[in-house]
Image (cartoon, coloured by chain):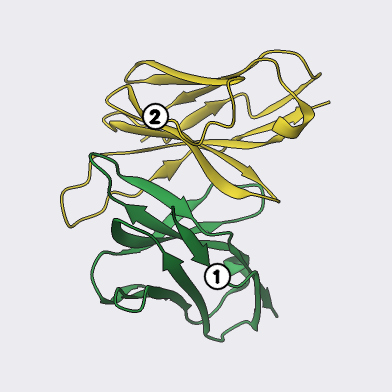
Chain colours: A yellow, B green
Amino acid sequence: DAGVIQSPRHEVTEMGQEVTLRCKPISGHDYLFWYRQTMMRGLELLIYFNNNVPIDDSGMPEDRFSAKMPNASFSTLKIQPSEPRDSAVYFCASSSRPDRGSNQPQHFGDGTRLSIL
Amino acid sequence: GQSLEQPSEVTAVEGAIVQINCTYQTSGFYGLSWYQQHDGGAPTFLSYNGLDGLEETGRFSSFLSRSDSYGYLLLQELQMKDSASYFCAVRVHSGSARQLTFGSGTQLTVLP
């Protein structure tokens, strides 16, 4: 079975440019999460969706960041305009709905390594 | 909000046993998960504790004490390939939320 697929794997761009990161969750998973990982701040949840609806975007750092999930098999994280401090590894993860008392682990994609020059 | 504490680094030798502790402070606690991440790779799920006690999965075990807000990951018969970062993560419940908050990670180095 295919796992979570992210693209691109690497992105290098100049500050001020728009950056779009893409994610295809595992089929049948109805939760999708976007994380950012840096040495300083670790693994931070940016936003997550349930059944394509954004549930909690309190982790989105500022208005330059936006995320969409137009359908169950695709999500984007967009940064516009990008800044050097946005350089990080961005992970997408998906999970199915956990029953009460049980757990459904999050399955992570391989991430996008983003460098803003 | 949530906060988690775990050691930043642990070193052990092949074949040994190592325990990585995690203490947490959170509201709406639902369970404690452990993830492994090799350099440059994706975090992968290892174990979950929703109830107090020990969960065993092969060479890895995880323990939870809800009353102490404490858990640990136990790795036995260490192998070189176990060198990685290990993250504890609290699963919190808020409304329909099922989100994870990750600790800062413990870098495990296994020496020959």
- Of the 4 image quadrants, the one containing the C terminus of chain A is top right
Is disc 2 placed on a helix, strand or loop? Answer: loop
Q: What amino acid type is highlighted by mark number 1?
A: Gln
* Quarter of the figure with residue A10: top right
Residue designated by label 1 = B6
Work out whether residue A18 or residue B39 is closer to the camera in this orientation and state it: A18
For disc 1, the chain is B
Can you give x and y, in whole percent of width and height, for residue B74 in the image?
Answer: 45, 78
Can you give x and y, in whole percent of width and height, for residue B70 in the image?
Answer: 40, 75
Dot 2: within a 10 Å radius of its alpha carbon, few (fewer than 14), some, or many (20 or more) residues?
many
Task: Work out which residue is located at the far right of the displayed protein and give it.
Answer: A117
Q: Tell me, yes or no, whether dots 1 and 2 are on the same chain.
A: no
A91 with respect to B108 (left or right): left
Please report the residue visible at 74 percent of the width from the left and 13 percent of the height from the top.
A17
B6 with respect to B112 (left or right): left
Is disc 1 placed on a helix, strand or loop? Answer: loop
Residue designated by label 2 = A25
Q: Is residue B61 visible to us here?
A: no
Work out whether residue A73 or residue B1 is closer to the camera in this orientation and state it: B1
Please report the residue visible at 41 percent of the width from the left and 19 percent of the height from the top.
A74
Q: Is residue B12 visible to us here?
A: yes
